[in-house]
Amino acid sequence: MELYLAAIILLIVLALSDLIVGVSNDAVNFLNSSIGSRVAPRSVIMAISSLGLLAGVTFSSGMMEVARKGIFNPTFFLFEEVIIIFLAVMITDILLLDVYNTFGLPTSTTVSIVFELLGGAVAVSIIKVSNAGGNISEIANYINTGKALMIIAGILISVAIAFVFGVAIQFITRLIFTFDYYRRLKRYGGIWGGISLSMIIYFILIKGAKGASFFSAGTVAWMESNAALMLLATFIVSALVLQVILLLTDYNILKPIVLIGTFALAMSFAANDLVNFIGVPLAGLSAYQVAAQSGNPFAITMEALQKPIQTNTLILLAAGMVMMVTLWFSKKARTVTKTEVSLGRQDEGIERFGSSPLSRSIVRMTSAAFLGLMKIFPQVMKNAVSRRLDPDRNVSSGHVSGDSPSFDLLRASVNLMVASALISFATSLKLPLSTTYVTFMVAMGSSLADRAWGRESASYRVAGVLTVIGGWFVTALMAFSVSLAFAFAIYYFHAAAVVLLLGISFLIIAMNHRSHKKRVTEEKELNVFNLQKITDASTAITAIFRHCGQLLKEVRSTLNRCYEGLFSNDLAALKELRKSNKKIQNWTNIITANIYKTLRLLNKEHVSHSQNYAQIINTLQEIAEGHRDIIMRSLGHVDNHHKGLLEVQIRELKNIIQCFNDILDHAIAAFLEEEEIDDPAIALILEKMERLSDRYDQNQIGRIVSEISKTRLSILFYGIMGKTKSIAGHSAELIEIFKKCFTCR
């Protein structure tokens, strides 16, 4: 039994790790609305969420039975066999969730744990049936197939229903209040607030009462029989109180609604999903205790796991504390939250996901269907609706520290109210729903209704939603198959398999950590280009030229490495540099977007000079295109094992590159260090570069005629020289624009 005691200790250690990766993934469920709307400083939001987590764990006792008997029938399994299942499940769960967290994709921890239990149980069932010489159909006796089918059905239904309700409720709400909602909130905000709070509070009671360790069966029964009365009373009281606040003060009542909703969803997450992280280890501990008390621990079946249990409150609170600490310090939790917020944000910007053929097709078909449907409505009605749904009237209420929120408090309250109502209703009908699925799809539906998915962003947003939804189904497939494989390995190779699987898991997690750290570093680099906190044109213009200097500095660095890689035929270096193309293009796109923002900030006195700033856009795009062309030409040449450049060609190109570096050094010094522009020196460098290129052009013609330089070498030589000159020339143009802009100011 000592070996199995070690297995139980390992399960408990894995439970701590699972709590960390699980909270990192599911924090998005309750943080999305509050962080996206910037209802309060992040520390306040986190504190309220932490209280919700701590309250929720005390409601989770009843959910622990899912891991014990919800997916497989423990009566048919021996002690050793359930430990194998539980070990396979926990190792798989940590690996799977960590992968999703690394890439910032929200997934359902409920689905993952259910299908991991299913996969592990199926593996052991196959072995048992095979050893007994039975028929494969007998596996149905071991597995609770009905539960798994209900969850799959719940996924499909909840995705559609949550999205449709998110669109419909947000559309109606926005039609009533518009984006400039303050004045209308004064009139009938109490009614709206009463509806929202009654839904959210009802959600707390319905979701939590059944699993609470401090509610008696009689209290739960009374709540269920008087649910309608409680709902009505909550609505009346909250509506009256909120309306009085609106009449007597200027306080925005949407703030407490969003914060209370955040608390409710955090509590719901802890109450429902805690089983996903510690349910399996606690079930393993119960199995060990039953086996240890029996006369023959290796022959006893686990029907004792069928009995209802009451989990120790101290264990639940300890788990809650781990969840709270993770919430505050997990960087991956912020990554997952950022993904969902970016998919629903109101304004334009750099999109988290690229478009795909499927997303573009969906957008085209939806647009065509919408335009066809609009023909049946009179133009007067369409104009009226369009005015009330005009996002340009967005008041950006609730923003903190000068940052514009991703969406306003009205949409945040709709997200919370609709998610709460749907989950409460499904729970009352005993329908399996995932908090992740509902909150995510409601948020996506409300963003669509708010016209956040415009023509400039729809394809990318749809691609992001499809990626997340596809990831949910991949979760089920991976959870089942990986857990099944791990269970087979542990059954046949025992402790050696556990040690090997743990080693592989920790190696993968370490790799994921490095990958995530790199992604975070890249995102921090992009934050340098953030103009959100800048509200005057003069500061914005200065920032744009500083950003141009940073871009040129990166272009200079990467292209010099590219030249070295080309001259030395270093394929590995050139392949690595290929990644810089995306970085340079991203930086260029962000600076371009910032220029548009700056043009909107320009006052009437500066409008006559705005063409100076607009010229930067074309210049930057040409530089980015030249950068990409040089790297891809060099990579293609070396990757195809073509003959390297001649020594004379390398010497000539190095002279051109020296001029290129000198021009970029002047530009970088002017933009980043604000040094005085030396016009004569720049003119001399450009003249020298032109003179050298003319001479080298004639030299290359001679090499072609004498057949010293073959066709591919000639194409490469002219391409590298031409694009290098082009980038230098456009950098000089940026310097001229810089002078004009700061002179006209």
Image (tube, grey):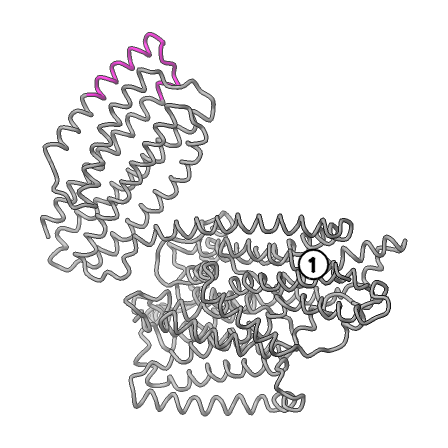
* Nearest the eye: 524 or 143: 524
Q: Picture coordinates of residue 175 (x, y %)?
A: 39, 74
Q: Crowding at label 1, few (<14), some or many (≥20) Cα neighbours within 10 Å?
A: many
**What residue would you read off at disc 1?**
87
Q: In the current view of this chain or complex, which residue is farthest to the front?
A: 2
Tell me: 157 left or right of 65.
Answer: left
* Nearest the eye: 514 or 626: 514
Tell me: 421 left or right of 378.
Answer: right
Q: Picture coordinates of residue 43 (x, y %)?
A: 39, 71
Q: Residue at x 72, y 58 (%)?
A: 120
Magenta stretch, main secondary structure, is helix
Q: Picture coordinates of residue 328 (x, y %)?
A: 45, 67
Q: Is residue 594 above or below residue 223?
A: above
Q: Amino acid at mark 1?
A: Leu
Tell me the quarter of the picture where residue 282 sits: bottom right
Task: Look at the image and say whether residue 25 sits in the magenta stretch.
Answer: no
SS class of the residue under badge 1? helix
Task: Look at the image and say whether residue 707 sits in the magenta stretch.
Answer: yes
* Nearest the eye: 101 or 355: 101
Q: How many marks?
A: 1
Q: Is residue 715 above or below residue 432?
A: above
Q: Residue at x 35, y 18 (%)?
A: 714
Q: Picture coordinates of residue 387 (x, y %)?
A: 32, 70
Q: Residue at x 37, y 44 (%)?
A: 583
Tell me the quarter of the picture where residue 703 sits: top left
Q: Residue at x 47, y 24 (%)?
A: 640
Q: Is residue 248 above or below residue 442?
A: below
* Nearest the eye: 629 or 81: 81
Q: Is residue 689 above or below residue 315?
A: above
* Residues shaded magenta: 692-715
